[in-house]
Image (cartoon, coloured by chain):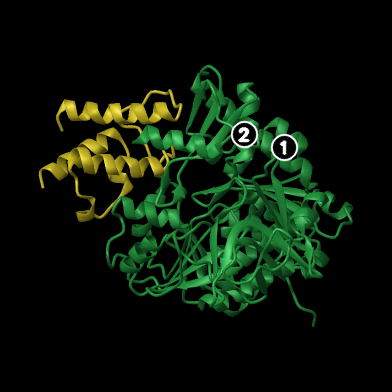
């Protein structure tokens, strides 16, 4: 039998082997594997019955997901997977302009929305959507209605979808949009083979077990969620979703739910430490901790180890373009630390991945030499949706092999461990959100009407950016009006906390806005 | 909590919301953090403010966001800590 690459297969297999085991828990609701598979299958049937689905003869259907964090979002995504489609999560905090840009790029076959997501479907958005629009919270009712009113059930379709539809290695599993320098979001296309390879590798690397209870802190549109969800379900474990408004109660939540696996960006650990929610021994049940999405400060890792004395801490590194994470470092008191930055090293490549440091000529740099980190191997994305030129630029062929240039400065030490040394470009991470400062510049230029603008990450706490400050040339503009206008163009995490007007914007020797000088102004202001 | 202290808390949030260009009024019983009106970074800054200006030792507490989610709850919380 050919390999099966459908991400839904693990849920289906566990629904047979351990039907009553918990798959997802959220607030006071839970779904067993049997219930989860049943809901995903019903939704897949509903999708496959739609005229759009049957009329379009394409290799990979794409299904947009408009859903807030919770069980319905998981069902929506799993239903799309079950039907053999790629899911495209659309962040509910995105402004309408960005949603329309994503819809224009995707050629979706269908949209699945929950109650919260449906609120975003204004007339303007609906005009850009495919005809098939399914409310995930109403599918059960529709299925029952269909049977009773028409008395007709499509038995061949039911039989076909009694298990997840088989997908080929190069079929798409999902498309996740990230920030782009031009102002237009980039859709990263991940194949079923890359996604399956990651999930299987990481379950083995971490040693996840069916008895585990794992934390979910992310929205579907953040690719860390791919790790949280599919690694948990691959292991047959339970995913416990933290309600978005209780993020700062995460320690209490982990204790109450007796979680054994923690997944989050290091910023969350830092904040829990700051508010003193994290005390020595406060997380005794944790046996695995996964930090990823941004640099892990050594002090944060040490404090975490104090709070969770029985946990093994994994620092995972990876861009969305290489399927979530592709390098891993286990933290211990004598683990490699990146000199001068006090961050935990990013470690060595996961099975199926390769990493190398390249010089400006694209040749592999010797150990100890700084260059750009390139990733190769099975987890590489197919590229950016509808952007072949950008794809060939960012995924060049070097020495006869395809690589992804991460834009991160890195060095490999003599023991083969990789260290990340920061960005080559102006990409930053705020609480794990990947942000291109140029994208904010574009929006700021548009709404302020000023040509010379600049944005910087500020403040910086424990080496990590916590917000953004914008600068415009000339006289001050009403900042409330500016913020309202920026919110129409940018998701909330990209809207500057402040916009400062300067008579003169400093420029560097190449005539570009000098972000370092702008950051120095803020440092000076805070002293 | 006396009125001066409560007024100080009101002013703190008035300033925080202003910095975020949130010009809407804030009632004493309105949710600050659980509603998502202020984010986790703002909460962290507020906890640090309480530690510094009200000498509250969060290390001795079992932190729960609901304790400090509105000005009224903050009032009760500060009172309970001052009387400890």
Rendering coords of residue A45 (x, y %)? 74, 59
Task: Name which residue lies at 23% across and 44% down.
Answer: B51
Question: Percent x, y for residue A402?
Answer: 77, 66
Residue toward you, A149 or A222: A222
**Cα separation between marks 1 and 2:** 20 Å
Determine the image quadrant of residue B45: top left
Could you tell me residue A95's position as x and y percent? 62, 35
A407 or A106, which is in the foreground?
A: A407
Q: Report in which chain the residue with disc 1 lies.
A: A
Foreground residue, A211 or A30? A211
The reply, left or right, for residue A207 in relation to residue A138 is left
The residue tagged 2 is: A441
Residue occupying image coordinates x 45% and y 37%: A520
Instruction: Report the chain shown in yellow.
Output: B
Q: Bin the neighbour count of mark 2 within 10 Å (Cα to Cα): few under 14, some 14-19, many 20 and up.
A: many
> Does A433 appear above or below A22?
above
Q: Secondary structure at mark 2?
A: helix
Q: Could you say which disc has been placed on residue A100 in the image?
A: 1
Q: Is residue A156 left or right of residue A369?
A: right
Q: Residues within 10 Å of mark 1 (few under 14, many from 20)?
A: some
Q: Quadrant of residue A80?
A: bottom right
Q: Which mark is residue A467?
A: none
Q: Colour of chain A?
A: green
Picture layout, residue A410 above or below residue A202: above
Instruction: Describe the element under mark 1 as helix, strand or loop.
Output: helix
Q: Pointers 1 and 2 in contact (CB under 8 A)?
A: no
Residue A214 screen position, x and y as percent: 47, 67
Quadrant location, the N terminus of chain A: bottom right
Q: Nearer the viewer, residue B2 or A512?
A: A512
Whether residue A203 is visible, yes or no, is yes
């Amino acid at each position: 039998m050919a390999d099966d690459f459908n991400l839904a297969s693990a849920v289906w297999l566990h629904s047979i082997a351990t039907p009553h085991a918990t798959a997802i828990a959220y607030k006071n609701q839970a779904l067993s594997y049997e219930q989860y598979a049943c809901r995903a299958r019903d939704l897949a049937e509903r999708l496959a019955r739609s005229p759009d689905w049957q009329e379009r003869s394409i290799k990979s259907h794409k299904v947009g997901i408009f859903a807030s964090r919770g069980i319905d979002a998981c069902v929506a995504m799993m239903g799309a997977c079950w039907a053999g489609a790629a899911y495209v999560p659309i962040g509910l905090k995105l402004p309408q302009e960005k949603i329309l840009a994503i819809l224009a790029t995707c050629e979706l076959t269908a949209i699945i929305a929950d109650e919260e997501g449906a609120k975003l479907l204004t007339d303007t958005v609906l005009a850009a959507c495919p005809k098939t629009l399914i409310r995930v919270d109403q599918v059960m009712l529709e299925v029952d209605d269909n049977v009773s009113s028409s008395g007709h059930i499509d038995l061949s379709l039911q039989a076909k979808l009694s298990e997840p539809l088989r997908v080929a290695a190069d079929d798409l599993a999902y498309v996740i949009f990230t920030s782009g320098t031009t102002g237009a979001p980039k859709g990263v296309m991940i194949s079923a083979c890359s996604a399956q390879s990651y999930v299987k590798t990481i379950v083995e690397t971490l040693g996840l077990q069916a008895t585990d209870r794992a934390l979910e802190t992310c929205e579907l549109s953040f690719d860390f969620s791919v790790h949280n969800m599919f690694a948990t379900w691959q292991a047959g474990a339970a995913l416990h979703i933290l309600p978005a408004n209780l993020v700062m109660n995460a320690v209490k939540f982990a204790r109450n739910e007796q979680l054994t696996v923690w997944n989050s960006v290091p910023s969350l650990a830092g904040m829990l430490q700051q508010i003193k929610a994290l005390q020595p021994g406060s997380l005794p049940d944790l046996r695995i901790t996964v930090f990823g999405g941004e640099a892990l400060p050594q002090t944060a890792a040490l404090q975490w180890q104090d709070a969770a004395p029985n946990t093994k801490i994994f620092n995972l590194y990876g861009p969305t373009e290489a399927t979530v994470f592709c390098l891993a470092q286990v933290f211990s008191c004598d683990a490699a630390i990146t000199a001068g930055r006090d961050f935990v090293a990013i470690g060595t490549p996961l099975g199926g991945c390769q990493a190398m440091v390249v010089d400006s000529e694209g040749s592999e740099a010797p150990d100890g030499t700084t260059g750009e980190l390139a990733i190769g191997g099975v987890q590489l994305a197919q590229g950016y949706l509808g952007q072949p030129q950008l794809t060939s630029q960012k995924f060049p062929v070097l020495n006869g092999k395809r690589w992804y240039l991460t834009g991160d400065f890195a060095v490999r030490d003599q023991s083969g461990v990789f260290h990340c040394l920061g960005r080559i470009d102006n990409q930053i991470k705020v609480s794990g959100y990947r942000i291109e400062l140029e994208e904010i510049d574009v929006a700021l230029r548009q709404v302020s009407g000023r040509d010379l603008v600049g944005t910087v990450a500020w403040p910086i706490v424990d080496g990590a950016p916590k917000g953004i400050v914008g600068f415009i040339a000339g006289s001050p503009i009403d900042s409330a009006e500016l913020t309202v206008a920026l919110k129409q163009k940018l998701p909330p995490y990209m809207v500057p906390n402040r916009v400062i007007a300067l008579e003169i914007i400093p420029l560097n020797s190449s005539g570009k806005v000098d972000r370092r000088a702008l950051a120095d102004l803020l440092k000076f202001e805070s002293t | 909590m006396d009125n001066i202290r409560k007024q100080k808390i009101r002013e703190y949030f008035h300033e925080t919301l202003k910095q975020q260009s949130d010009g809407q009024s804030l009632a004493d019983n309105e949710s600050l953090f659980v509603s998502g009106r202020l984010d986790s970074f703002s909460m962290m800054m507020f906890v640090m403010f309480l530690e510094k200006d009200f000498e509250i030792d969060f290390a001795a507490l079992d932190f729960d966001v609901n304790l400090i989610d509105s000005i009224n709850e903050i009032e009760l919380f500060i009172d309970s800590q001052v009387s400890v």
